[in-house]
Every structure is written in structure tokens, then in C-alpha cells.
Image (cartoon, rainbow, N blue to C red):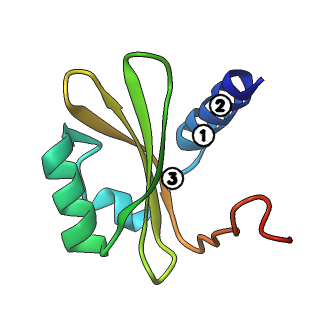
Amino acid sequence: MVRAFLNLIVGLLCGVVLLTSAGQAAAQMPRCAQREAMVSILNGNFQESQQAFGFLGPAMLLELFVSDSGSFTIVVTGTDGVSCVLVAGTGWEGLPPAGDGV
């Protein structure tokens, strides 16, 4: 069930990337780079740090980077160490973990 949900989310995100403009923030950074370089760019240029991650099977890692101002980037990293931007945007709002009375 969780795997199907993640596959749906990744599919939707890929569709959004293909159908919409990447925006100004994404235009200022490479679409793919070695993970260390990508993390450095996200932190240095956008003040984004990793807030969440999940495995998309044995060969891919989905990562969410968010800044205090609400900008966010979702990247996928392969076993080769290359990270690629799926989507970037603004206005990210985090939710409390499930079971916190919400």
C-alpha cells in the first residue's frame, strides 16, 4: 500500500515537472549533479536542508529539502550518487507527525 502510494506521488511529481515551468529557482541550479554538489547548492543558494527521505526501491532515494522561508526541492538520488531535481517550489508547510493529536 505504501509502495503504491509512493509510486503514485512520484508519478504525479514527474507529471508536474513535465507540464509546468521549473521556475526561477530551478533555473539557477543544475537539474542533475553528484549528491554532495546538489546538497551544497541547495544549502548555499536556497538555505534548504534535508527534512525527509524515503526509499523508492533498492536503487533510488527520494529526498525533500526545505528552507525556513518555505522554499522546497524534491530530488531523487540513484545508487550512482547522482541526484536529480524532480520539482522545486515555494510555500512548503510541514505537518505534525501522525499521532500528535491533530
Task: Give me the C-alpha separation between circle 1 and circle 2.
Answer: 10 Å
Mark 3 is surrounded, within 10 Å at the Cα level, by few (under 14), some (14 to 19) or many (20 or more) other residues, namely few
Number of residue marks: 3
The label shown at residue 13 is 1
Looking at the rendered image, the disc whose residue lies closer to the viewer, 2 or 3, is 2
Q: Is 35 placed left or right of 11 in the picture?
A: left
Of residues 2 and 22, which is closer to you in this image? 2
Task: Give me the C-alpha separation between circle 2 and circle 3.
Answer: 23 Å
What residue is drawn where x is 50% and y is 25%?
56
CB-based contact (under 8 Å), mark 3 and mark 1 = no
Q: Amino acid at mark 2?
A: Leu
CB-based contact (under 8 Å), mark 2 and mark 3 = no
- Residue 42 in percent (x, y) is at 27, 62
- Residue 94 in percent (x, y) is at 63, 69
The residue labelled by disc 3 is: 21
Q: Is 73 placed left or right of 34 in the picture?
A: right
